[in-house]
Image: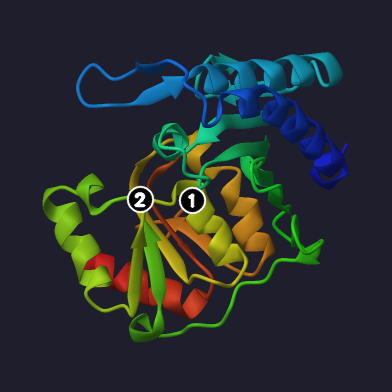
Amino acid sequence: MTPSALLPFLDRLADAASESIMPHFRAAGRVDNKAATGFDPVTAGDRAAEAAMRALINEVHPAHGIMGEEFGNERLDAEKVWVLDPIDGTRAFISGLPVWGTLIGLLDDGRPALGMMAQPFTGERFSGDGGSARYTGPGGPRPLATRPCAALADAVISTTTPALFKGAERDAYLRVEEQVRLVRYGYDCYAYCMVAAGFMDAVVETGLQAYDIVALIPVIEGAGGRVTNWEGGSAAGGGRVVASGDARLHERILEALAG
């Protein structure tokens, strides 16, 4: 089965996650902290959604592997491995802000081949297979396409928070931020989807896990953009990531990060 043949299954997984999450959004639920130091929140919605997606994968595609944020890994040596982040942007989720999403990615022989960001509160889904990308939601379905933007001076960029960057990484990031037209903070996966939709131009991050980015790579690349690490290599493992709508801008950002 080709990865593209699994596109309808993305919607089934997103439906299962949405049904599990929405009873917990803007509800007075418990928030646990997974971090030994600092704050890394997790909710019942996170756990219920990942459990629902895992159950569906194991029922329909039992030979496929699973990499998940909340419940670890299964069969990572499989040809096809699903990469799940049930609520990317849990801080926004617990703050009642609708800029979180469910990330569902598929690795095919280690390559990000399929992905979706589903936002059940707004009813939006952004999906792609690396060759094309599409949106469904209010206003009806449409293809996703990044916009041209060659110069840093014209760019609208985003990062989750500048506090993520420390030491030399902070200096590198500021070399980018100081040159752009507009910066927006705090949008997690939603910012990447706005790059794919042609409303923002780039996202610069550090400290990502694979489940934070694998689902978004086929969406942005399918819309005409580029996603790499800060050195221009694969971003599939997470870490320091740049996602851009225009390859020319991407090069300018990598140059600025390198100093």
Q: Looking at the image, is 124 positioned above or below residue 9?
A: below
Q: Residue at the location (40% across, 19% down)? A: 31
Question: Is residue 45 in view from this perspective?
Answer: yes
Give percent across and percent down for residue 69: 50, 24
- Residue receiving disc 1: 234
Q: Nearer the viewer, residue 254 or 103?
A: 103
Q: Looking at the image, is 142 positioned above or below residue 18?
A: below
- Residue receiving disc 2: 160
Q: In the rendered view, does 200 fall on the left or right side of 136? A: left
Q: Which of 136 and 153 is in front in this view?
A: 136
Local crowd size for mark 1, using a 10 Å CA cut-off: few (<14), some (14–19), many (≥20): some
Q: Looking at the image, is 55 positioned above or below residue 243?
A: above
| Amino acid bearing label 2 | Thr
| Mark 1 or 2, nearer chain start | 2
Give percent across and percent down for residue 74: 62, 15
Q: Nearer the viewer, residue 175 or 122?
A: 122
